[in-house]
Amino acid sequence: MKKIDSRFRHLPEEDALEAMEHHKKLEEAPAAYNAYLKADYYGEKKDRDQFVQQDRRRFLDLIGKSGIAAGLLKGSALLGGILANRHALAQTDVNKRVVFCYVNSGAASGQWMPTSASQMNQITRAYGPQGYSVSDICHFRQIDVITGGHQTALNSLGVTDYSSPTMDRRIAAVLGTSTPRASIYLGAKATTNGTLCSNIGPCQDSPTQALASIFNGTSGGGGGTTPDTTYALSYDAQLRALDAIKGKLSTEEYARYQEHIDSLRKIKTNTAAANSSSGNTTTTNCGTGITPSVANMQATGRSQADIIVAALACGITKVATLQLGNHQGDWLGHNTAWTQDAHQACHGAPSNTAFTEMWRYLNDVPAYLIDKLRKTSGPDGQPLINSTVVVQVTCMGNGMDHSSGNAPFIVATQMPGFTPGFSARSGGNIYDLNGAIPKGMGLTGINLGTSTLGLV
C-alpha cells in the first residue's frame, strides 16, 4: 500500500491518494508556465499600470470636488460607493464588473450541455424556461481544466499552482482601485473542507457576517446566542450619513440610492428573521422547515448572491467571487430525494441519478444570481447585467471519475465586448476561458490563453 503523505492524512484514503498525485503533477509541471503567470501579473505591465494610475488620479480629483468630508467618506462604504459610481459613469472604461461563481465537482457526463436556449439539459434546467429564463444570454462551454482530481479548485480560475494570482484577483488589481472594496469573496459551505477556488481571500461563509463586514460593520458577528445587531446599527448610521449629504447629490443619484437602501433593508429583515427564529448568529434567510444546524445550500447561496448584487449596485466593489461548496462536496440538499451529502452522490450512488439531482439543485443559485443582475439597476439606471459578466466555473469535468475534460463553464452577460445571445460548444481549456474575460471587458495587460472560445 502506498504511504500517505502527512499533509493529506486527514482525508479519506482514496482522496488522499488523488491529492498526492495532483501535487506530484504540480511539482512536475513546467516551471516556465508558472514563471510566465507570475511575470505577467507582478512584472511591469505598462498598459495596466497606466490604466490604474489614471483611474486613481481621476477618482481622487472627483473626491476633492465633491465637497464631502474625508472622515465621513472613510466611515461609510455606501458613501464611498456613491462616489465610485459617479466616477464610473464619467469613465465608461471602468463601468464594468465581474462575478465569478464556483460550483464544485463539475457535472455528470451527458447531463449538463443544453441544445438550445429553450432546451436545457437535466442539470441546467434552472437557466431555461423551466427556471429563471436567463439562458438567452448564457454561453455554455465544456472545456479542459488541465488537472483532474481533488485539491484543484484554483484551476477553475486559471492557475495550476498555489502562488500565482487567480483571475478574480488579477482583475481586482485593475478595477478595484476606485471602490471601497477591491473585491469580495463569499461562500456557502466553501470553507469547511479543503482548498478554496480563489486566493483573493478571506472567504466568508456567513451572510450575516458578510453583511456586517461589507456594509460598514465589523468582520465578525455578535457571538454566542444573542442575535447580531452590528449590521442594523451600521445600516442606521449609513442612512443618517446619506441624509446629511443628500444636498450634494443629484436628484437621480439620491433616488437611485434610496432604491438600493430599500434592497438592503429587505436583506437585513430576512437575516434578522432567521436569527430570531434560530437563535444562531450564522444562519441565513432560509425558508421554513429547514433545520438551522444544517445549511440549506440554495437559501445560503441566494442570500450571498443578494449581498453581492447589492454591493455591486451600491458601488462598494466591482469584483466578487461566490463559492458554492468545496471540492469535497460536504453539503446537503433539501427537498431532494438524495439525503446524503454531495460527495456520496458522486461516489456512493450506483448511478449518476443522485449526482445529477444534487447538481441540478446547486445550479439554481448561479441562475438566480444572473436573474437578479437582470432585475437590479446599476448606477447608470440600466440593468446590472449590461455592465457585469458572470463567470460560472468549476474544478472538474465529471465529479464521479474526477476527470479534467468537458468541465462545465458558463459566461453570462449583456456587456458590450462579449458575443451576444446564447451559445453552446465544447473545446479549449481553462486558460482560454479565463483569458477571454478580461479581453471581453477591454482590460489590457491581463493575458492568458490562446483562444477566446467564441466568447469575444
Image (spheres, rainbow, N blue to C red):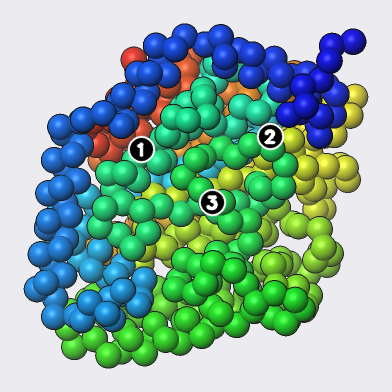
- Between 277 and 27, the residue placed more toward the observer is 27
Q: Residue at x 28, y 76 (%)?
A: 73
**Badge 1: few (under 14), some or many (20 or more) residues near its Cα, within 10 Å?**
some
For marks 2 and 3, give the CA distance: 17 Å
Sequence-wise, which precedes: disc 3 or disc 1? 1
Q: Is residue 445 above or below residue 196?
A: above
Amino acid of disc 1:
Arg
Q: Are the residues at dot 3 and dot 1 in contact (C-beta closer than 8 Å)?
A: no
x, y percent for residue 431: 42, 21
* Crowd tier of the residue under label 3, counting other residues whose Cα lies within 10 Å: few below 14, some 14–19, many 20 or above: few
Q: Residue at x 84, y 15 (%)?
A: 3
Q: Left of 46 or right of it: where is 24?
A: right
Q: Residues within 10 Å of mark 2 (few under 14, many from 20)?
A: many
Give, as a three-letter code, the residue at label 3.
Pro
User: Seen in the image, is 366 located left or right of residue 430?
Assistant: right
Q: Is residue 412 visible?
A: no
433 relative to 231 in the view: left or right = left
Task: Report x, y in % for residue 139.
Answer: 45, 31
> Which residue corresponds to mark 2?
327
For label 2, the SS is: loop
Kindly identify which numbered label has been placed on residue 170: 1
- Residue at label 3? 202
Please tell me which residue is depicted at 74% across the width and 38% down the height of the picture. Answer: 329
Quadrant assignment for the C terminus: top left
* Position of 385 relative to 83 (above/below): above
